[in-house]
Structure formats: C-alpha cells, structure tokens
C-alpha cells in the first residue's frame, strides 16, 4: 500500500512539474502584460494601457492584418490542394506514387531555415518579388503536407463500402463523394485547416526569407520589437497572439465534437 502511494506521489509530482515547465512562461507573460511598470521584473499594478497601445499601433495592426490575410488564403489553398492530394494518393495508383509519398513530407522534416532559403532561391531565379504573394506561396508549401497527413489518416477509417453502396443505388461518383464520403471526411479536413492556419499565423523563419518590407507579418513585427528589449507591450502582443491561436484550436475542437455527435 505504501509503495503504491509512494509511486502515485512521484507520478503526480512529475506530471505537475511537466505542466509547470510548459505553462509557467505563458502565465508569466499574461500577468506582466497587465503590469503598470515597463520593467518585467516586479509586478507593480494592474493596467490595460499596454493593450490600448497595441491596438492603436499602426505597424502592429498592419502586421496582424497581413498575418490574417496570409493565414486565411494559404489555409484555403493548402486545404483544397492537400485534400485532393490525400484522396488521389489514397485511392488511385499512378507512376511515381511511392516517391511522391516520401517527397511530400520533406517540408515537415527539413529545418525551416533550409526551406526558407530554398524558396528564396526559387523566387530569385523566377524573378518573383517578395510580397504577400510570395509569402502566401511559401505558407501553402509547408501547410500542404500537414493537410495531406490529417486527411489521409481520416480516409483510412472510412468504410469504402458506404460509397460503393451509394453507387449501387444509382448515385454518380461525384454525388456519392459529396453526399457520403465528404461529410465523413470533414473532421479531418477541418483539423488540417485549423492546424495550417495556426502554423501560418505562428511562422517566423520561413516568413523572414519570403516576405517583403511592405508585407511584414505579426510574428516578424514582434521579433523586431523584442530586439530592443521585452516590455509589457510585447507581453500584451504575445497574449493576443496566443488567444487567437487558442480560439482557432477551440473552434476546431468544438466543430469536431459536434460532427462526432451528429
């Protein structure tokens, strides 16, 4: 009995320390974003002044707008291309399928700095100017594999006989896909889209190499501000960014729960 209690204590202690290690820095950032003092050493009082400064800062809001535009467009394109790619690679045979299957995941495993330099080299050779367009292309490139991965994992669990039954009942392949397969596939598509948007919104390294001076993103703006020192304004920016990402994750989770209940 004592051994079990001893083992349980250390297990709970380890779990507790893990959570502290993961979330304490986030809690500190949130707390100091309300600090009246500019110094992130002692908490001297509560204020919303830094949040007001963030929302009245043109550079920050412009960068946030760029991030949302890039995130929305790149997520939409990556979701469409990735979903079609996942369906094609799961259901059809074609020359070079195995090679493509391995090459597809290269953007996931290679360092982001390598991918950023590679994309910059391609843009330079193709004379593509660095702008929101080049940034969207870059984000679509590294988001597609994540969409393919999530959609393919969902496809594995779908019973093919359901679509075959629809075809036997007289439905065309397109109607059978839209009315039978697509609703079952939707949770995987939503997961891939949510993951892509969060990755796009959070990216710094690839964006650094593929964006122009007039298309700075929110993470790059924060990175530039951190170089002069961490202030409560930066804490407020970080808190806002975390809230946006958490909101995307929560919406994604709620949508999936509703789909499962249906």
Image (tube, grey):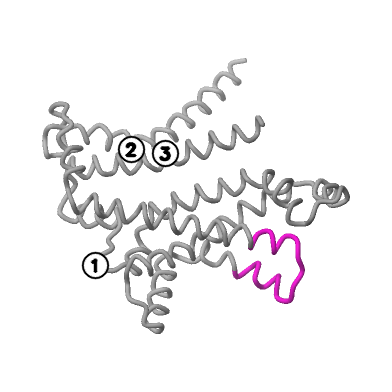
258 to the left or right of 57 = right
Residue at image coords 70%, 50%? 178
Q: Nearer the viewer, residue 253 or 181?
A: 181
Which residue is under mark 3? 246
Q: Nearer the viewer, residue 199 or 5?
A: 199
| SS type, badge 2 | helix
Which image quadrant: the C terminus?
A: top right
Magenta part of the chain: 85-103
**Front: mark 3 or 1:** 1
Residue 118 drawn at (x, y percent): 43, 75
The main secondary structure of the magenta stretch is helix
From the viewer's perspective, is residue 25 above or below residue 219? above
Residues marked 2 and 3 touching at CB (< 8 Å)? no
Residue 213 drawn at (x, y percent): 24, 67
Compare marks 2 and 3 and give the one earlier in the sequence. 2
Compare marks 1 and 2 and give the one earlier in the sequence. 2
Which residue is under mark 2? 26
Residue 42 drawn at (x, y percent): 15, 32
| SS type, badge 1 | loop
């Amino acid at each position: 009995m004592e051994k079990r209690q001893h083992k349980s204590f250390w297990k709970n202690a380890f779990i507790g320390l893990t959570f502290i290690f993961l979330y304490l820095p986030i809690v500190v950032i949130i707390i100091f974003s309300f600090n009246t003092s500019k110094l992130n050493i002692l908490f001297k009082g509560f204020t919303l002044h830094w949040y007001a400064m963030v929302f009245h800062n043109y550079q920050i809001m412009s960068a946030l707008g760029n991030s949302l535009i890039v995130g929305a467009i790149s997520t939409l394109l990556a979701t469409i291309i990735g979903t079609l790619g996942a369906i094609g690679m799961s259901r059809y045979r074609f020359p070079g399928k195995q090679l493509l299957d391995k090459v597809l995941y290269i953007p996931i495993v290679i360092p982001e700095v390598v991918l950023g330099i590679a994309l910059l080299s391609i843009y330079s050779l193709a004379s593509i100017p660095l702008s929101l367009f080049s940034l969207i292309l870059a984000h679509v490139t590294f988001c597609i594999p994540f969409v393919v991965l999530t959609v393919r994992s969902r496809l594995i669990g779908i019973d093919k006989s359901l679509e075959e039954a629809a075809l036997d009942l007289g439905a065309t392949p397109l109607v059978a896909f839209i009315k039978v397969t697509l609703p079952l596939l939707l949770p995987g598509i939503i997961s891939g889209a949510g993951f892509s948007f969060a990755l796009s919104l959070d990216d710094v390294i690839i964006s650094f190499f593929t964006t122009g001076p007039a298309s700075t993103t929110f993470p790059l703006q924060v990175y530039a501000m951190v170089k002069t020192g961490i202030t409560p304004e930066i804490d407020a920016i970080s808190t806002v960014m975390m809230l946006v990402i958490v909101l995307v994750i929560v919406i994604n989770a709620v949508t999936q729960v509703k789909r499962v209940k249906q």
